[in-house]
Image (cartoon, rainbow, N blue to C red):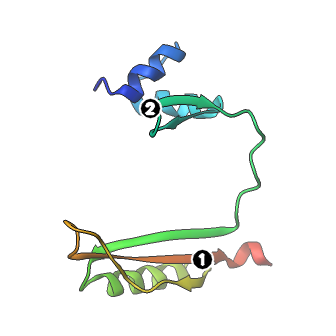
Amino acid sequence: MKQTKKYTKACEIATLTHNNQESLYKQLNALGFFWDSKIQKWLRDDRLADEPTNLIRVRVWAATEKVEQAAACFIEACGEYDLKLQEKSEPYQCRPPKQAESRIYLTFTDNKEAE
């Protein structure tokens, strides 16, 4: 396994059996820990979790000339799963060196939950 700072610090605070880094991170998350990349530390937050949102948010990222088509395909496919489109952003061009790519943000609600 790659000895990243995140992994090394995780091993310092947990002696959990794990097969790979992701399984260790999931176990730490389940115990209330999260990785703060700005300060390069695992922190613990014991507060109760907020209720989950009923929204489904998706970022569609593609070549600028394809992003609208990709978003339309995604919107159509989500309709088959009874998801209702609530909001669609305008395309946002990415910063250099990714300026030939753009992003569109989509927000859906689950029609089944609304009933």
Considering every residue shown, the one lying at the far front of the view is 39
The residue to which callout 2 is attached is: 40
Q: Position of residue 32 (x, y in %)?
A: 65, 32
Camera-nearest residue between 62 and 114? 62
Tag 2 secondary structure: loop
Q: What residue type is labelled 1?
A: Phe
Q: Where is residue 50 in the image (x, y as percent from the top left)?
A: 75, 51
Q: In which quadrant is the C terminus drawn?
A: bottom right
Which label was assigned to residue 42?
none
Quadrant assignment for the N terminus: top left
Where does label 1 land, which residue? Answer: 108
Q: Dividing the picture into quarters, in which one does residue 61 lie?
A: bottom left
Residue at x 45%, y 40% (from the top left corner): 38
Q: In this view, does 54 lie above or below 38?
A: below
Instruction: Please say whether residue 20 is visible from this viewpoint.
Output: no
| Total marks in image | 2
> Label 2 crowding class (10 Å Cα cut-off): few <14, some 14-19, many 20+?
few
Distance of label 2 from label 1 (alpha carbons): 34 Å
Mark 2 residue type: Gln
Locate residue 43: give its quadrant: top right
